[in-house]
Amino acid sequence: MRRAKLSLVLALLVALLIGCSSNGNSGSSAATGSDASGSPGQQAEVELKFMMWGNQAHMDVYDKLIEGFQQENPGIRVTMESVPFADYQQKISVLAAGKSLPDVAWVAERMVPQFMDNGILADVSEFKDDAEFNLADFIPSTLDLFRDGDKLRGLPFSTPPVVMFYNKTLFDKAGLTDPNTLAKEGKWTWAEFEKSAQTIASKDAKNRVYGANFFRDWTNWVTLSSYSWSNGSGPFNKEITEFTWNDQYGIETFQMLERMMFTDESHPKAGEQVSFDAGNLAMFFDVYSYVSRAREIQDFEWSIAPTPSGSQGSVPMLGQAGYALFNDSKHPEEAKKLLKYFASQEGIQATSTYFVPPRTTVLNSDEFINQPNNPSKEHILQAVIDEMPKARILPGHVRWQNIDNAILQGFDRLFGKVSSAEDNLQKIADEVNAIMRG
């Protein structure tokens, strides 16, 4: 009898422990820290991992998106991780080797060729059959990066062209016509750009002002491609099998930068930290996404303009970032649901606070154009929307990291003034072409 009573007590204790366990939380979502349904008593059945390289403001947007997704999809929990961009591609490669990739992740344009070559990107071409998702709403050229024959290996969420942020207060102080007005008149050329930078620059140590800066950081050389593109050339041939920047227009690009750095001193020297929002820089080249930071500027008047024109007009670089699914996801159908939610019209509308949207309906919406402290609608149309059809993605290569390192070594030689532009670019060409052939 005593044994039966003891058994009954043990059974009750086990039941009590199980009940307490079921009311617990096995993990926190990026959005709310609750389970997927939002009800404290229901355990999530599936956990999806989402990886990106965004800052806290970007993560805040995704927190809300993830919360909405979880409410619509009880039983699915999403966790988010942000990895610094400098470490991101290497991190993905390490995770791929260990078969522990996230389910959904951001990918940048120069990562995609390597990831395709490694065979880790899943096909999402079936999305075209979903009328509600409306894949046709995406600007066709924004999908080109992800096309792999008849397969689609991802979807874009950000397609920002490089624009020129300019300090209108400094232009007015120097008595110069602003770049938007000159661009309308067809007079915003590279020569006019260089002349404006020289005029505005001040070498006064107590009031140092720079005319222009091409570099978001000192490894970001690709913005300078616009000079060659606007003159019908470029750093590489169309097939991305040969480095071609050692031609006339590549040499002119390097010579322009040398003049601005060392002769006019209108451009910062390598290593100098000069910020556009500090107010002592007249012109700064970056993708439109930088506007999220520029909106906070209160000390001077600023706007955006197209990149300067060459003989073929203006041709900005188009940055691109997208979403990818990975082939080894343990929950591929749930991961597709998450990607669709992020890339839906509502999802792209939410992220358009910081990113130029690839969906036509969102790109032309008042919500995107008329955000608080944005440039004027006229200038967004002129510098962003009208420029996007002309913009070019700097094509990737499976050995991009090696190619990029060889080019950066050439820029180190330029910064150190150790060789002429002609000799420097020929050395870069020899090294890069050897990498491409290898």
Image (cartoon, rainbow, N blue to C red):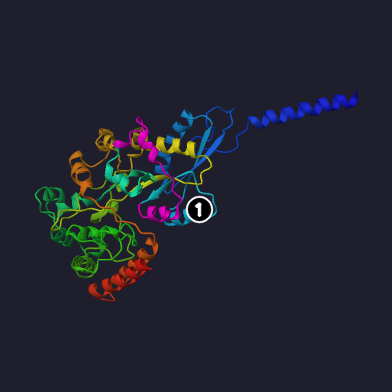
Q: Say if the magenta span includes residue 166.
A: no
Q: Quadrant of residue 402?
A: bottom left
Residue drawn where x is 23% and y is 45% of the image? 384
In the picture provided, is 78 more to the left or to the right than 417?
Answer: right
Place of residue 418 in the rendered image (x, y in percent of width and height, measured from the top left): 29, 76
Which residue lies at the image location 35% right of the left edge and 52% below the top edge?
Answer: 109
Disc 1, SS: helix
The crowding category of the residue bearing disc 1, from other C-alpha atoms within 10 Å (few below 14, some 14 to 19, many at least 20), is: some
Q: Please say whether residue 135 is one of the residues in the magenta stretch.
A: yes
Depth check: 78 or 296 in front? 78
The residue sitting at the right extreme is: 1
Which residue is the extreme one toward the front? 150
Q: Can residue 321 be seen in this view?
A: yes
In the displayed structure, does residue 76 sit left or right of residue 228?
right
Residue, disc 1:
96
In the foreground, 240 or 155: 240
- Above or below 182: residue 436: below
Bounds of the magenta span?
A: 109-136
The residue type indicated by label 1 comes to Ala
The answer to which image quadrant residue 217 occupies is bottom left
Residue 302 in view (yes/no): no
Residue shown at 24% from the left, 56% from the top: 281
Q: Position of residue 317 (x, y in %)?
A: 26, 53
